[in-house]
Image (spheres, grey):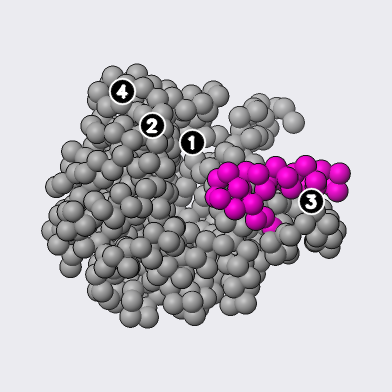
Protein backbone atom coordinates (compact mmCIF):
# COMPACT_ATOMS: atom_id res chain seq x y z
CA UNK A 1 0.00 0.00 0.00
CA UNK A 2 1.11 3.58 -0.68
CA UNK A 3 2.46 5.66 2.18
CA UNK A 4 1.26 8.97 0.74
CA UNK A 5 -1.25 10.01 -1.97
CA UNK A 6 -1.62 13.45 -3.52
CA UNK A 7 -5.17 14.46 -4.47
CA UNK A 8 -5.22 16.47 -7.68
CA UNK A 9 -8.69 17.91 -7.14
CA UNK A 10 -10.88 20.00 -4.88
CA UNK A 11 -14.37 20.08 -3.37
CA UNK A 12 -16.38 17.11 -2.17
CA UNK A 13 -14.46 14.52 -4.20
CA UNK A 14 -11.16 15.61 -2.61
CA UNK A 15 -12.72 15.20 0.84
CA UNK A 16 -14.13 11.81 -0.22
CA UNK A 17 -10.67 10.59 -1.28
CA UNK A 18 -9.16 11.84 1.99
CA UNK A 19 -11.75 9.76 3.89
CA UNK A 20 -10.77 6.64 1.93
CA UNK A 21 -7.06 7.24 2.50
CA UNK A 22 -7.53 7.75 6.24
CA UNK A 23 -9.30 4.38 6.50
CA UNK A 24 -6.42 2.75 4.61
CA UNK A 25 -3.80 4.39 6.82
CA UNK A 26 -2.44 6.43 3.90
CA UNK A 27 -1.23 10.01 4.39
CA UNK A 28 -2.69 12.65 2.07
CA UNK A 29 -1.46 15.76 0.31
CA UNK A 30 -4.02 18.36 -0.76
CA UNK A 31 -3.31 20.83 -3.52
CA UNK A 32 -5.26 24.06 -3.64
CA UNK A 33 -5.61 27.31 -5.54
CA UNK A 34 -5.41 30.68 -3.84
CA UNK A 35 -9.23 30.77 -3.88
CA UNK A 36 -9.40 27.48 -1.94
CA UNK A 37 -6.98 28.34 0.84
CA UNK A 38 -9.70 27.77 3.49
CA UNK A 39 -11.37 24.81 1.76
CA UNK A 40 -12.35 21.70 3.71
CA UNK A 41 -10.02 19.38 1.79
CA UNK A 42 -7.10 21.61 2.75
CA UNK A 43 -8.09 21.39 6.41
CA UNK A 44 -8.49 17.59 6.49
CA UNK A 45 -5.39 16.55 4.51
CA UNK A 46 -2.13 15.75 6.29
CA UNK A 47 -0.28 18.25 4.08
CA UNK A 48 -1.41 21.02 1.74
CA UNK A 49 0.42 22.83 -1.07
CA UNK A 50 -0.76 25.90 -2.98
CA UNK A 51 -0.36 25.33 -6.72
CA UNK A 52 -1.42 28.66 -8.19
CA UNK A 53 -4.04 31.37 -8.69
CA UNK A 54 -7.80 30.82 -8.70
CA UNK A 55 -8.13 30.16 -12.43
CA UNK A 56 -8.21 26.39 -13.09
CA UNK A 57 -5.73 26.67 -15.97
CA UNK A 58 -3.21 28.13 -13.52
CA UNK A 59 -3.83 25.65 -10.71
CA UNK A 60 -5.91 22.46 -10.92
CA UNK A 61 -5.11 22.02 -14.62
CA UNK A 62 -1.43 22.97 -14.25
CA UNK A 63 0.33 19.63 -14.69
CA UNK A 64 3.80 20.97 -13.90
CA UNK A 65 2.64 22.48 -10.60
CA UNK A 66 0.85 19.30 -9.54
CA UNK A 67 3.81 17.05 -10.37
CA UNK A 68 6.13 19.45 -8.51
CA UNK A 69 3.84 19.28 -5.47
CA UNK A 70 3.93 15.47 -5.60
CA UNK A 71 7.72 15.44 -5.83
CA UNK A 72 8.19 18.00 -3.05
CA UNK A 73 5.89 16.05 -0.72
CA UNK A 74 7.27 12.62 -1.69
CA UNK A 75 3.81 11.41 -2.72
CA UNK A 76 3.95 7.99 -4.35
CA UNK A 77 0.60 8.23 -6.14
CA UNK A 78 -1.87 10.81 -7.45
CA UNK A 79 -5.64 10.40 -7.33
CA UNK A 80 -7.23 12.71 -9.94
CA UNK A 81 -10.86 12.43 -8.72
CA UNK A 82 -13.28 13.44 -11.47
CA UNK A 83 -13.14 16.43 -13.81
CA UNK A 84 -9.97 18.52 -14.21
CA UNK A 85 -7.13 16.11 -15.24
CA UNK A 86 -8.89 12.83 -14.42
CA UNK A 87 -9.25 11.79 -18.09
CA UNK A 88 -6.12 13.49 -19.40
CA UNK A 89 -3.90 10.83 -20.96
CA UNK A 90 -0.95 13.20 -21.10
CA UNK A 91 -1.18 13.78 -17.34
CA UNK A 92 -1.22 10.01 -16.74
CA UNK A 93 1.88 9.70 -18.97
CA UNK A 94 3.70 12.45 -17.08
CA UNK A 95 2.90 10.68 -13.79
CA UNK A 96 4.31 7.46 -15.26
CA UNK A 97 7.48 9.21 -16.47
CA UNK A 98 7.89 10.84 -13.06
CA UNK A 99 7.64 7.45 -11.32
CA UNK A 100 4.38 8.45 -9.64
CA UNK A 101 1.44 6.03 -9.76
CA UNK A 102 -1.63 7.44 -11.49
CA UNK A 103 -4.71 6.04 -9.75
CA UNK A 104 -6.69 5.17 -12.86
CA UNK A 105 -6.34 3.29 -16.16
CA UNK A 106 -3.22 3.25 -18.33
CA UNK A 107 -2.64 6.33 -20.55
CA UNK A 108 -3.29 4.47 -23.81
CA UNK A 109 -6.69 3.29 -22.58
CA UNK A 110 -7.63 6.78 -21.39
CA UNK A 111 -6.64 8.12 -24.82
CA UNK A 112 -8.66 5.45 -26.67
CA UNK A 113 -11.82 6.00 -24.64
CA UNK A 114 -11.33 9.78 -24.57
CA UNK A 115 -11.76 10.00 -28.33
CA UNK A 116 -15.51 9.46 -28.59
CA UNK A 117 -15.38 8.46 -32.25
CA UNK A 118 -12.57 5.92 -31.75
CA UNK A 119 -14.30 4.60 -28.63
CA UNK A 120 -17.54 4.02 -30.56
CA UNK A 121 -15.63 2.25 -33.31
CA UNK A 122 -13.74 0.06 -30.84
CA UNK A 123 -16.78 -0.88 -28.79
CA UNK A 124 -18.74 -1.75 -31.92
CA UNK A 125 -15.84 -3.99 -32.95
CA UNK A 126 -16.02 -5.66 -29.52
CA UNK A 127 -19.72 -6.40 -29.75
CA UNK A 128 -21.56 -3.45 -28.19
CA UNK A 129 -24.39 -1.89 -30.18
CA UNK A 130 -23.81 1.72 -31.25
CA UNK A 131 -26.15 4.22 -32.86
CA UNK A 132 -25.71 4.74 -36.62
CA UNK A 133 -23.25 7.57 -37.14
CA UNK A 134 -20.12 8.86 -38.82
CA UNK A 135 -16.43 9.19 -38.13
CA UNK A 136 -14.85 12.57 -37.42
CA UNK A 137 -16.12 14.97 -40.07
CA UNK A 138 -13.52 16.60 -42.32
CA UNK A 139 -15.74 19.02 -44.23
CA UNK A 140 -19.25 20.45 -44.51
CA UNK A 141 -19.77 18.36 -47.64
CA UNK A 142 -18.92 15.17 -45.75
CA UNK A 143 -21.33 16.19 -42.98
CA UNK A 144 -24.11 16.59 -45.55
CA UNK A 145 -23.44 13.16 -47.06
CA UNK A 146 -23.26 11.42 -43.68
CA UNK A 147 -26.38 13.15 -42.35
CA UNK A 148 -28.32 12.06 -45.43
CA UNK A 149 -27.05 8.49 -45.03
CA UNK A 150 -27.91 8.26 -41.31
CA UNK A 151 -31.17 10.16 -41.65
CA UNK A 152 -32.51 13.16 -39.76
CA UNK A 153 -32.77 14.03 -36.93
CA UNK A 154 -29.10 13.71 -35.99
CA UNK A 155 -26.87 14.79 -33.10
CA UNK A 156 -23.51 16.47 -33.71
CA UNK A 157 -21.01 15.68 -30.94
CA UNK A 158 -17.49 16.72 -29.99
CA UNK A 159 -15.09 13.83 -30.60
CA UNK A 160 -12.77 14.88 -27.77
CA UNK A 161 -15.20 15.71 -24.98
CA UNK A 162 -18.53 15.46 -23.24
CA UNK A 163 -20.65 17.22 -20.64
CA UNK A 164 -22.95 18.68 -23.29
CA UNK A 165 -20.35 20.93 -24.88
CA UNK A 166 -19.96 20.72 -28.64
CA UNK A 167 -23.36 19.03 -29.00
CA UNK A 168 -26.16 20.14 -31.31
CA UNK A 169 -29.42 18.51 -32.43
CA UNK A 170 -30.06 18.91 -36.17
CA UNK A 171 -33.59 18.14 -37.37
CA UNK A 172 -33.24 19.06 -41.05
CA UNK A 173 -30.63 19.80 -43.72
CA UNK A 174 -31.36 23.53 -43.43
CA UNK A 175 -30.01 23.55 -39.87
CA UNK A 176 -26.86 21.52 -40.53
CA UNK A 177 -24.35 24.17 -41.60
CA UNK A 178 -24.85 26.57 -38.69
CA UNK A 179 -25.09 23.73 -36.13
CA UNK A 180 -21.86 22.21 -37.43
CA UNK A 181 -19.96 25.49 -37.14
CA UNK A 182 -21.30 26.12 -33.62
CA UNK A 183 -20.45 22.62 -32.43
CA UNK A 184 -16.93 22.84 -33.88
CA UNK A 185 -16.34 26.21 -32.22
CA UNK A 186 -17.60 24.94 -28.85
CA UNK A 187 -15.46 21.83 -29.13
CA UNK A 188 -12.37 23.87 -29.95
CA UNK A 189 -12.97 26.19 -26.99
CA UNK A 190 -13.74 23.41 -24.49
CA UNK A 191 -11.38 20.62 -25.56
CA UNK A 192 -8.77 22.23 -27.80
CA UNK A 193 -10.00 20.29 -30.84
CA UNK A 194 -12.70 21.17 -33.40
CA UNK A 195 -13.29 17.51 -34.29
CA UNK A 196 -16.94 16.45 -34.30
CA UNK A 197 -18.93 13.48 -35.54
CA UNK A 198 -22.63 12.78 -35.94
CA UNK A 199 -24.95 10.02 -34.85
CA UNK A 200 -28.63 9.20 -35.09
CA UNK A 201 -30.69 11.23 -32.61
CA UNK A 202 -32.96 9.29 -30.26
CA UNK A 203 -36.02 11.38 -29.43
CA UNK A 204 -36.82 10.21 -25.86
CA UNK A 205 -33.87 8.24 -24.49
CA UNK A 206 -32.92 7.17 -21.00
CA UNK A 207 -29.32 7.41 -19.82
CA UNK A 208 -28.07 4.13 -18.32
CA UNK A 209 -24.50 3.46 -17.18
CA UNK A 210 -22.62 0.43 -15.83
CA UNK A 211 -20.07 0.80 -13.05
CA UNK A 212 -17.00 -1.36 -13.54
CA UNK A 213 -13.89 -2.18 -11.52
CA UNK A 214 -10.84 -4.06 -12.79
CA UNK A 215 -7.58 -5.05 -11.15
CA UNK A 216 -4.15 -5.34 -12.78
CA UNK A 217 -4.28 -9.14 -12.78
CA UNK A 218 -7.00 -9.61 -15.39
CA UNK A 219 -10.18 -9.58 -13.29
CA UNK A 220 -12.93 -7.25 -14.45
CA UNK A 221 -16.32 -6.98 -12.75
CA UNK A 222 -19.38 -4.75 -12.89
CA UNK A 223 -21.53 -3.51 -10.04
CA UNK A 224 -24.84 -3.07 -11.78
CA UNK A 225 -26.23 -0.01 -13.49
CA UNK A 226 -27.23 3.52 -12.60
CA UNK A 227 -30.07 5.57 -14.06
CA UNK A 228 -28.81 9.08 -14.88
CA UNK A 229 -31.69 10.24 -17.05
CA UNK A 230 -32.67 13.32 -15.02
CA UNK A 231 -30.44 15.93 -16.66
CA UNK A 232 -30.45 19.58 -17.60
CA UNK A 233 -28.40 20.61 -20.63
CA UNK A 234 -26.61 17.24 -20.51
CA UNK A 235 -25.60 17.81 -16.86
CA UNK A 236 -26.94 15.18 -14.46
CA UNK A 237 -29.13 16.28 -11.55
CA UNK A 238 -30.45 13.02 -10.08
CA UNK A 239 -28.97 9.52 -10.26
CA UNK A 240 -30.20 6.21 -8.90
CA UNK A 241 -29.37 2.51 -8.74
CA UNK A 242 -30.72 0.19 -9.90
CA UNK A 243 -32.54 1.67 -12.89
CA UNK A 244 -36.34 1.29 -12.76
CA UNK A 245 -36.16 0.50 -16.50
CA UNK A 246 -33.86 -2.53 -16.14
CA UNK A 247 -34.55 -6.11 -15.14
CA UNK A 248 -32.20 -8.83 -13.93
CA UNK A 249 -31.97 -10.56 -17.31
CA UNK A 250 -31.03 -7.37 -19.19
CA UNK A 251 -28.57 -6.44 -16.44
CA UNK A 252 -26.86 -9.82 -16.73
CA UNK A 253 -26.78 -9.72 -20.54
CA UNK A 254 -25.47 -6.16 -20.87
CA UNK A 255 -23.11 -6.50 -17.93
CA UNK A 256 -21.57 -9.54 -19.58
CA UNK A 257 -21.07 -7.69 -22.87
CA UNK A 258 -19.43 -4.77 -21.05
CA UNK A 259 -17.02 -7.04 -19.18
CA UNK A 260 -15.97 -8.94 -22.31
CA UNK A 261 -15.23 -5.66 -24.10
CA UNK A 262 -13.19 -4.24 -21.22
CA UNK A 263 -11.23 -7.45 -20.80
CA UNK A 264 -10.16 -7.21 -24.45
CA UNK A 265 -8.89 -3.63 -24.15
CA UNK A 266 -7.07 -4.44 -20.88
CA UNK A 267 -9.00 -2.01 -18.72
CA UNK A 268 -7.90 -1.42 -15.11
CA UNK A 269 -9.26 0.52 -12.12
CA UNK A 270 -12.73 2.15 -11.92
CA UNK A 271 -14.72 3.20 -14.95
CA UNK A 272 -18.22 3.74 -16.25
CA UNK A 273 -19.67 2.53 -19.56
CA UNK A 274 -22.59 4.72 -20.61
CA UNK A 275 -25.55 3.85 -22.83
CA UNK A 276 -28.60 5.45 -24.35
CA UNK A 277 -31.78 3.38 -23.98
CA UNK A 278 -34.34 3.98 -26.73
CA UNK A 279 -38.11 3.84 -26.41
CA UNK A 280 -38.08 0.07 -27.08
CA UNK A 281 -35.55 -0.60 -24.31
CA UNK A 282 -32.56 -1.18 -26.62
CA UNK A 283 -29.18 -0.04 -25.26
CA UNK A 284 -26.60 1.74 -27.44
CA UNK A 285 -23.04 2.50 -26.34
CA UNK A 286 -22.58 6.23 -25.76
CA UNK A 287 -19.15 6.72 -24.19
CA UNK A 288 -16.85 5.54 -21.42
CA UNK A 289 -15.64 7.61 -18.49
CA UNK A 290 -12.24 6.33 -17.37
CA UNK A 291 -12.50 7.61 -13.79
CA UNK A 292 -14.66 7.63 -10.69
CA UNK A 293 -18.04 9.28 -11.31
CA UNK A 294 -19.83 11.95 -9.29
CA UNK A 295 -22.64 9.43 -8.78
CA UNK A 296 -20.48 6.53 -7.55
CA UNK A 297 -22.09 6.83 -4.11
CA UNK A 298 -25.41 5.28 -5.17
CA UNK A 299 -23.55 2.16 -6.30
CA UNK A 300 -21.70 2.08 -2.97
CA UNK A 301 -25.02 2.25 -1.12
CA UNK A 302 -26.60 -0.70 -2.95
CA UNK A 303 -23.49 -2.91 -3.05
CA UNK A 304 -21.71 -2.11 0.21
CA UNK A 305 -18.38 -1.66 -1.61
CA UNK A 306 -16.13 1.37 -1.15
CA UNK A 307 -15.16 2.22 -4.73
CA UNK A 308 -12.61 4.91 -3.88
CA UNK A 309 -10.73 2.68 -1.43
CA UNK A 310 -10.75 -0.06 -4.05
CA UNK A 311 -9.33 2.31 -6.66
CA UNK A 312 -6.36 2.93 -4.40
CA UNK A 313 -5.93 -0.77 -3.60
CA UNK A 314 -6.03 -1.72 -7.28
CA UNK A 315 -3.48 0.98 -8.18
CA UNK A 316 -1.22 -0.41 -5.44
CA UNK A 317 -1.34 -3.80 -7.17
CA UNK A 318 -3.89 -5.60 -5.00
CA UNK A 319 -6.29 -8.13 -6.49
CA UNK A 320 -10.06 -7.85 -6.38
CA UNK A 321 -11.37 -10.31 -3.79
CA UNK A 322 -13.85 -13.07 -4.54
CA UNK A 323 -16.65 -10.96 -3.07
CA UNK A 324 -16.39 -8.68 -6.12
CA UNK A 325 -17.43 -11.60 -8.34
CA UNK A 326 -20.75 -12.01 -6.51
CA UNK A 327 -22.24 -8.53 -6.57
CA UNK A 328 -25.77 -8.32 -5.18
CA UNK A 329 -27.79 -5.11 -5.38
CA UNK A 330 -29.50 -4.49 -2.05
CA UNK A 331 -32.40 -2.07 -2.03
CA UNK A 332 -32.42 1.21 -3.93
CA UNK A 333 -30.35 4.41 -3.72
CA UNK A 334 -30.92 7.91 -5.11
CA UNK A 335 -28.53 10.86 -5.29
CA UNK A 336 -29.41 14.54 -5.68
CA UNK A 337 -26.65 16.91 -6.73
CA UNK A 338 -26.81 19.99 -4.50
CA UNK A 339 -25.47 22.80 -6.64
CA UNK A 340 -24.99 26.45 -5.70
CA UNK A 341 -27.38 27.71 -8.34
CA UNK A 342 -30.57 29.75 -8.40
CA UNK A 343 -33.50 27.28 -8.45
CA UNK A 344 -35.43 29.40 -10.97
CA UNK A 345 -32.72 30.46 -13.41
CA UNK A 346 -29.97 27.87 -12.66
CA UNK A 347 -27.49 30.74 -12.51
CA UNK A 348 -24.40 29.85 -10.41
CA UNK A 349 -24.49 31.48 -6.98
CA UNK A 350 -21.13 32.15 -5.32
CA UNK A 351 -20.90 33.64 -1.85
CA UNK A 352 -20.64 33.09 1.89
CA UNK A 353 -22.51 30.21 3.56
CA UNK A 354 -23.98 31.77 6.70
CA UNK A 355 -25.83 28.71 8.00
CA UNK A 356 -25.79 24.95 7.45
CA UNK A 357 -27.79 22.02 8.77
CA UNK A 358 -27.12 18.55 7.33
CA UNK A 359 -29.87 15.92 7.28
CA UNK A 360 -29.31 12.56 8.92
CA UNK A 361 -31.20 9.49 10.06
CA UNK A 362 -31.47 5.99 8.57
CA UNK A 363 -30.21 5.57 5.02
CA UNK A 364 -28.98 9.16 4.58
CA UNK A 365 -25.47 10.15 3.46
CA UNK A 366 -24.09 13.60 2.63
CA UNK A 367 -20.82 14.01 0.70
CA UNK A 368 -19.81 17.66 0.86
CA UNK A 369 -17.09 20.26 1.10
CA UNK A 370 -19.34 23.11 2.25
CA UNK A 371 -19.37 24.26 5.88
CA UNK A 372 -20.72 27.23 7.86
CA UNK A 373 -18.74 30.39 7.00
CA UNK A 374 -17.21 28.72 3.94
CA UNK A 375 -16.97 30.78 0.77
CA UNK A 376 -18.24 29.28 -2.49
CA UNK A 377 -15.87 30.68 -5.16
CA UNK A 378 -17.16 31.65 -8.62
CA UNK A 379 -14.34 29.93 -10.51
CA UNK A 380 -15.33 26.26 -10.43
CA UNK A 381 -18.20 23.82 -10.90
CA UNK A 382 -21.25 24.73 -8.80
CA UNK A 383 -21.58 21.29 -7.12
CA UNK A 384 -21.12 21.77 -3.36
CA UNK A 385 -22.70 18.60 -1.92
CA UNK A 386 -24.35 15.31 -2.81
CA UNK A 387 -27.32 13.96 -0.87
CA UNK A 388 -27.64 10.18 -1.13
CA UNK A 389 -30.53 8.18 0.32
CA UNK A 390 -30.93 4.40 0.51
CA UNK A 391 -34.10 2.42 1.11
CA UNK A 392 -35.33 -1.15 0.96
CA UNK A 393 -37.00 -0.27 -2.35
CA UNK A 394 -37.38 2.74 -4.65
CA UNK A 395 -40.44 4.09 -2.83
CA UNK A 396 -38.64 4.15 0.50
CA UNK A 397 -35.55 5.74 -1.08
CA UNK A 398 -37.73 8.52 -2.54
CA UNK A 399 -39.50 9.02 0.79
CA UNK A 400 -36.18 9.31 2.60
CA UNK A 401 -34.85 11.70 -0.01
CA UNK A 402 -37.95 13.86 0.30
CA UNK A 403 -37.63 14.24 4.09
CA UNK A 404 -33.83 14.65 3.89
CA UNK A 405 -34.21 17.51 1.39
CA UNK A 406 -36.70 19.18 3.73
CA UNK A 407 -34.12 18.97 6.55
CA UNK A 408 -31.16 20.16 4.44
CA UNK A 409 -30.62 23.85 5.21
CA UNK A 410 -28.03 26.02 3.45
CA UNK A 411 -28.25 29.75 4.13
CA UNK A 412 -26.48 32.67 2.48
CA UNK A 413 -26.51 31.25 -1.05
CA UNK A 414 -29.12 29.79 -3.37
CA UNK A 415 -29.14 26.06 -4.14
CA UNK A 416 -31.11 23.57 -6.22
CA UNK A 417 -32.71 21.95 -3.16
CA UNK A 418 -36.19 23.34 -4.08
CA UNK A 419 -35.85 21.84 -7.59
CA UNK A 420 -35.01 18.42 -6.14
CA UNK A 421 -37.98 18.62 -3.77
CA UNK A 422 -40.26 19.20 -6.75
CA UNK A 423 -38.69 16.31 -8.68
CA UNK A 424 -39.20 13.90 -5.76
CA UNK A 425 -42.89 14.89 -5.63
CA UNK A 426 -43.39 14.59 -9.40
CA UNK A 427 -45.83 11.86 -10.45
CA UNK A 428 -43.88 10.77 -13.52
CA UNK A 429 -40.60 10.55 -11.60
CA UNK A 430 -42.20 8.52 -8.78
CA UNK A 431 -43.63 6.15 -11.40
CA UNK A 432 -40.24 5.80 -13.12
CA UNK A 433 -41.48 7.42 -16.33
CA UNK A 434 -38.68 9.59 -17.67
CA UNK A 435 -36.43 10.55 -20.53
CA UNK A 436 -33.50 12.94 -20.83
CA UNK A 437 -36.11 15.63 -21.65
CA UNK A 438 -37.79 15.18 -18.27
CA UNK A 439 -36.37 18.38 -16.75
CA UNK A 440 -37.32 20.53 -19.76
CA UNK A 441 -40.92 19.33 -19.45
CA UNK A 442 -40.81 19.49 -15.68
CA UNK A 443 -39.62 23.10 -15.59
CA UNK A 444 -42.36 24.12 -18.02
CA UNK A 445 -45.21 22.71 -15.95
CA UNK A 446 -46.79 19.79 -14.20
CA UNK A 447 -46.39 16.13 -15.06
CA UNK A 448 -48.89 14.16 -17.11
CA UNK A 449 -49.77 12.17 -14.00
CA UNK A 450 -50.60 15.35 -12.06
CA UNK A 451 -52.61 16.72 -14.96
CA UNK A 452 -54.62 13.51 -15.24
CA UNK A 453 -55.27 13.42 -11.49
CA UNK A 454 -56.61 16.97 -11.72
CA UNK A 455 -58.90 16.09 -14.62
CA UNK A 456 -56.84 17.84 -17.28
CA UNK A 457 -55.39 16.36 -20.47
For residue 178, say whether it is visible: yes
Badge 1 or badge 2: first in the primary sequence = 2
Does the magenta run of residues contain 80?
Answer: no
Q: For numbered disc 2, what is the local secondary structure? A: helix
Quick check: 315 above or below 457?
Answer: below
Q: Decide: marks 1, 2 in contact (CB < 8 A)? A: yes
List x then y, in percent, for residue 302.
Answer: 36, 56
Q: Pointer 1: what residue?
A: 424
Q: Nearer the viewer, residue 280 or 164?
A: 164
Q: Pointer 2: what residue?
A: 405
Q: Residues within 10 Å of mark 3 (few under 14, many from 20)?
A: some
Q: For numbered disc 1, what is the local secondary structure? A: helix
* The quarter of the displayed image where residue 21 is located: bottom left
Q: Which mark is residue 353?
A: 4
Tag count in the figure? 4
Quick check: 274 above or below 443?
Answer: below
Mark 3 and mark 4: Cα distance apart in space:
45 Å
Q: Pointer 3: what residue?
A: 153
With 48 as the anchor, is 211 left or right in this view?
Answer: right
Residue drawn 28% across the image and 19% down it: 354
Badge 3 or badge 4: first in the primary sequence = 3
Mark 2 and mark 4: Cα distance apart in space:
17 Å
Quick check: 450 above or below 263?
Answer: above
Q: Residues within 10 Å of mark 2 (few under 14, many from 20)?
A: some
Q: If the image is split into quadrants, where does the C terminus sit?
A: top right
Mark 2 or 4, which is nearer the eye? 4
* The quarter of the displayed image where residue 145 is located: bottom right
Region rendered in magenta:
168-197
Badge 3 or badge 2: first in the primary sequence = 3
Mark 3 or 2, which is nearer the eye? 3
Badge 1 or badge 4: first in the primary sequence = 4
Amino acid sequence: MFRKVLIANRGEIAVRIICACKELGVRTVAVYSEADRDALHVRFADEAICIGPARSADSYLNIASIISAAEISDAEAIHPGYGFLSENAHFAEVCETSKITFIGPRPEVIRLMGDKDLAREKMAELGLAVLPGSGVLNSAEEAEREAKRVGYPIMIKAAAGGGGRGMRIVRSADELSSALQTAQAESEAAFGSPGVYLEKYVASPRHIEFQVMADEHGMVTHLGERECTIQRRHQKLVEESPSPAMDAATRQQMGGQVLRALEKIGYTNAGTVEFLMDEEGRLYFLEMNTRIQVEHAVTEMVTGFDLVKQQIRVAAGERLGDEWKRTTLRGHAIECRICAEDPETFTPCAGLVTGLHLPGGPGVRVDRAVYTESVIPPYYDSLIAKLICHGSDRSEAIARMKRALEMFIIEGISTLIPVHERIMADGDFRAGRMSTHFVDRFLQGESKAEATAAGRS
